[in-house]
Image (cartoon, rainbow, N blue to C red):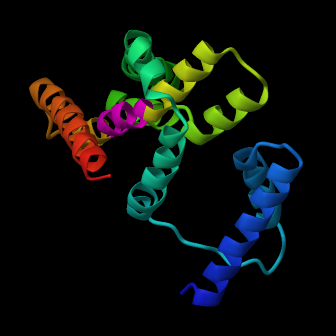
C-alpha cells in the first residue's frame, strides 16, 4: 500500500527535477525519464504500482491538454491532411510493420498479439515531441506537424490495441473494428467541441 506521504514526495521530487531541467534548458520529459530510471536502482526506494486505467484517465488527458494549448489551431487547420495521414495512416502502418517483424522474430506469436505490441510502440509521445521540437529550433511547419500528429496518434493506437486484444479473445470482426474507430473519432470530436464551448 502506497502511503500519502510517499505520493507527495514523488510529486515534489518530480516537480523539482522538472524545474531544474527547465532552468538548464533541458527537456523535462527526457530528464524525468532518466532520473526515474536511475532512482529505481537505488535500494530502499518504494515501488509505486500503477494501473493502466489510472494512467489513461489520470495522466494522459492533462498531458495532451497541456500540449494542445501550445499548438496553434490555425496552423493545424492548414496542415490537417498531413496531420491526418501522420496520426492515422502512419500509426497503423507502424503497428502492422512492428507486428510483421515480431512475427518474424517469434514465429509462434499470434498476429493479434503481434499487432497489440505494434499498437503499443507505434504512437510518439506528444509532450516529448513538443519539447524537443521547440528547443532545437525546427521550422514552424515541422513543429506544427509533429505537435498535431502527436496529439491525435493516441486515439488510433488505443483503438488498434483494444481491437487486437479483443481479437486475441476471438470476439471481434472487421466491421466492429471500423465501427469502433469511427465512434472514437465522432465522440472525440463531439467531446472536444463541448469542452471548447464550455471553456
The percent coordinates of residue 32 (x first, y second) are 74, 54
Q: Quadrant of the N terminus?
A: bottom right
The percent coordinates of residue 188 (x first, y second) are 25, 39
Q: Nearer the viewer, residue 80 or 95?
A: 80
Q: Tell whether 9 sits left or right of 72.
A: right
Instruction: Give the residue drawn at x 61%, y 79%.
Output: 7
Instruction: Give the residue drawn at x 43%, y 62%.
Output: 58
Q: Nearer the viewer, residue 94 or 98?
A: 94
The percent coordinates of residue 79 (x first, y second) are 44, 12
From what the image shows, is residue 189 above or below residue 86? Answer: below
Please say whether residue 156 is one of the residues in the magenta stretch.
yes
Q: Nearer the viewer, residue 163 or 8?
A: 8
Instruction: Give the residue drawn at x 24%, y 35%.
Output: 189
The picture quadrant where one finds residue 84 is top left
The residue range painted magenta reads 152-161
From what the image shows, is residue 12 above or below residue 18? Answer: below
Marks counted in the figure total 0
Instruction: Give the residue drawn at x 80%, y 50%.
Output: 22
The percent coordinates of residue 194 (x first, y second) are 22, 46
Amino acid at each position: 500500500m502506497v502511503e500519502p506521504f510517499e505520493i507527495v514526495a514523488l510529486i515534489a521530487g518530480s516537480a523539482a527535477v522538472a524545474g531544474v531541467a527547465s532552468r538548464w534548458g533541458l527537456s523535462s520529459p527526457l530528464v524525468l525519464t532518466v532520473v526515474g530510471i536511475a532512482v529505481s536502482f537505488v535500494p530502499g526506494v518504494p515501488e509505486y504500482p500503477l494501473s493502466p486505467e489510472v494512467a489513461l484517465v489520470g495522466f494522459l488527458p492533462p498531458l495532451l491538454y497541456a500540449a494542445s494549448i501550445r499548438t496553434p489551431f490555425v496552423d493545424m487547420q492548414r496542415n490537417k491532411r498531413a496531420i491526418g495521414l501522420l496520426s492515422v495512416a502512419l500509426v497503423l502502418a507502424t503497428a502492422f510493420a512492428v507486428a510483421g517483424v515480431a512475427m518474424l522474430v517469434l514465429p509462434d506469436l499470434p498476429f493479434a498479439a503481434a499487432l497489440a505490441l505494434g499498437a503499443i510502440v507505434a504512437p510518439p509521445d506528444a509532450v516529448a515531441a513538443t519539447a524537443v521540437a521547440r528547443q532545437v529550433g525546427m521550422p514552424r511547419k515541422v513543429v506544427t506537424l509533429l505537435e498535431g500528429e502527436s496529439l491525435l496518434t493516441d486515439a488510433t493506437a488505443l483503438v488498434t490495441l483494444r481491437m487486437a486484444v479483443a481479437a486475441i479473445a476471438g470476439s471481434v470482426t472487421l466491421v466492429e473494428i471500423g465501427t469502433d474507430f469511427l465512434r472514437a473519432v465522432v465522440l472525440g470530436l463531439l467531446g472536444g467541441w463541448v469542452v471548447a464551448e464550455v471553456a
